[in-house]
Amino acid sequence: MTSLSAAIAEDSVLLREGLTSILTAGGMTVVAAFDNAEELLAAVRDLKPSIAILDIRLPPTHTDEGMRAALDLRAHQPEVAVLVLSQYVEVGLAMQLLSDSTNGVGYLLKDRISDIQDFLRAVRQVAAGGSAIDPTIVSTLLSRRRTDDVLTRLTPREHEVLQLMASGTSNQGIADAMVITLRAAEKYVSSVFEKLGIASSRHDSRRVLAVLRYLRS
Amino acid sequence: MLWAVTVTGIGMGAAALVLALASEQLDRPALRAFLVGWIVVPYIVSGAIAWWRRPDSALGPLMLATGFAMGLTPLQWSVDPWLHSIGQLLDMLPAAMFLHVFLAFPTGRLTRTADRILVVACYGIALGLQLVKTLVGADPSSRFVTAANPGLAGVVEGVQLSLVATLLLAGTWLLYRRGRATGRSARHPAALVADSFGLALVMLAVLYVAGLASWPATDTVRLVAFAALGLAPLAFLFALLSARLARGAVAGLLIELRADPSKDLRGPLARALRDPALEVTYWLPQFTRWADENGRPVAAPQPDERRAVRILDRDGAPMAALTFERALEDEPELVDAVAAAATIALENARLRAELNARLQELQGSRVRVLEVGRLERQQLERNLHDGAQQRLVALSLELGLLHESAATDPKLRARLGQAKSEVSTSLSELRDVARGIYPAVLTGHGLEVALESLAARATVPVRLEVNLRSRPPENVEVAAYYVVSEALTNIDKHAAATSAAVTVTHRGARVVIDVDDDGCGRVDPAKGSGLRGLIDRVQALAGEVTIEAAQPAGTRVHAEIPCS
């Protein structure tokens, strides 16, 4: 298999270098690493890496430069996967990222990087066209009271599956995480969809959006 | 003193009666005595009342003096030669005094040069020529005859009576002209009555001419002239005291000024003073000059022949000036009362203006304090983000790498994992702190994204609808964000609601926020400092917040914030 190539935009030197070394150690090639979005966009156009990893807050204003660059990439170079890193995760931003195109999108808290193997798995998942949504978002959405009691009708195992699905985990990933067979995982997934009354989708990323939309409605 | 004067005066009337009855030379003595009393008593009584009620006015004493002068003339009927001579000498004095009183009404003073000349001339003729006439033997029984010359005496008497009659007519003409010039009739109905008694002067003049020409109707003319002269003081008194009635207008003035304090002051004041030409000028201390009600600079108000000036002051510093018809000076109580009302109104207006200025200043500083606070919090959040949070993330990453490389030492690996999760917890807590300090997502991504996160964190499902044409200024966004945040917090804590709806729209240049829930509707902004705080925040931006029960259940928090 060809090694994945990545481009990074992160203004903290420590993190930029940390990311580079983690990705390199994980067998990927870091083709570009900048502290701003402008140069990253230019580099992505030229080098066409498999994935672009961006901090949301980038110079010059440290507000939404990284986010705008990510949306720009989704719109104009959908073949390049995008992983957005941030100090905070916002449901609204996740929806924005996902609604543009559900293929190859990730949105994680920065401190997820320190769980190195999980982080590398997420990068590969996104680069392969899947998605990775920070579990914080899912747990926030799941934590509130609901008028309907559909969620209470889910079994604890189904609940676990729902959370994994909403984070962008594939059926195989769910099977691995829950230490069950792929078939068992698939049965859980279709059971959850049935109970929630949403159309099942074979596409991992699309079902993330469906589940998130369901949870926030 | 007044009583003594009055009693003396009335005694003089009685004495005149006695003298007339005792006289042998008078025909119809009772009628003559009655006519004298008819004049003396009203002048004495009216003069005394005027003096008592208006101690400052010279009119009272003048009327008293006229009454006394009139009261002395019956001495000429005395059988005693000396008293008769003195009475005879004073015979014409009342004529001059009548002219004096009529021209001096209503102030009791002669302010115009023409009046003064006329009155002085009349006194001179009435007393001077009377003396000359007596000296040359106009009245042979007088003790003062020194060189009897009946022919000359007749000529002098003719000249004297003609001149007095002329002066009286001139005085009447002056009164008539003045009445027209000041338009007093429109101002003061009582003054019209008083002025009409100027006719009495005409009658007196006619009386003298008639006496001179020895008309047969002299007695009838005398009757009419005296009747008019005797009624005049009552009219004067009425006119003088009617100022008391006019003061009733001040109550109306106060009510009018109170009903609409912002209204122009001049109109009500002009009505209360019955002077349509009243001018109000304002002193502007900051420019040290006078101005009209529109702020246009005008000359300092100066009194002149026809207009008087009253300065309204506060603690000795001028505030405004009233320029009014000089005739109003004889109603000092009215002018005082109107001036007092105007002073109160001006003082109120000044206080109101000062209060408004302070309020605006306060409003401005409230906005500045809030804005400074907002910017400080924003900076603090940035410092946290770029500092502590960034370092902790780097530390967490370092621990993660160490954790990886310690695969051979399970004990170390476990401890490193523990440390990493500690840092992770710290980061999570720090994120909450940072979010509490400032909603940074707002700056970067706008109200909709920020509210989306708020809605996601609420414990009840929230239907969110944000419909903004463009991004409002950030301070407005922050205020709107806190309105929704506090309202949702409140719903979580108190409302026992099952769902909520948030809508944010533009209405004109205002951002309108509504947060509805279906809970139990018990919201008291006085209790929660959060709701109170958000009301303050919105009001500081000149917006408003209302919290009310919604139909059929629940509570609606409604806020409107202008985007200026």
Image (cartoon, coloured by chain):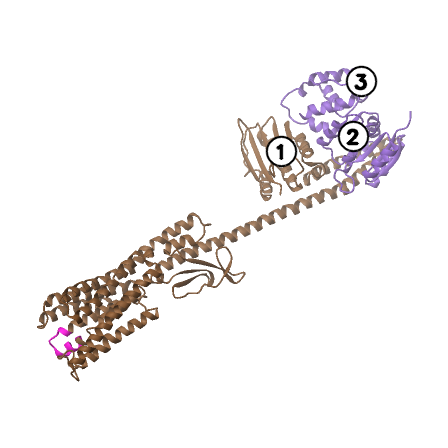
Q: Is residue B78 above or below residue A21?
A: below
Q: Is residue B78 magenta?
A: yes
Asked which secondary structure carries label 1, the reply is strand
* Residues drawn in magenta: B76-87
Q: Is residue B120 left or right of residue A77?
A: left
Instruction: Measuring from the top left, give residue B549's x and y in whole percent.
Output: 53, 31
Residues at marks 3 and 1 on the same chain? no
Instruction: Measuring from the top left, give residue A60's x and y in whole percent.
Output: 78, 42
- Front residue of B1/A133: it is B1
Q: Return the residue at label 1.
A: B504
Residues at marks 2 and 1 on the same chain? no
Instruction: Measuring from the top left, give residue B198's x and y in whole percent.
Output: 26, 63
Q: Chain of mark 3?
A: A
Could you classify mark 1 by the number of other residues whose Cα lies within 10 Å: few (under 14), some (14-19), or many (20 or more)?
A: many
Q: In the rendered image of this protein, which colour is used for chain A?
A: purple
Q: Is residue B501 above or below residue B247?
A: above
Q: Earlier in the sequence, mark 3 or mark 2?
A: 2
Amino acid type, label 1: Val
Q: Return the residue at label 3.
A: A180
Could you classify mark 2 by the number of other residues whose Cα lies within 10 Å: few (under 14), some (14-19), or many (20 or more)?
A: few
Q: Return the residue at label 2.
A: A75
Q: Quadrant of residue B303?
A: bottom left
Q: Chain of mark 1?
A: B
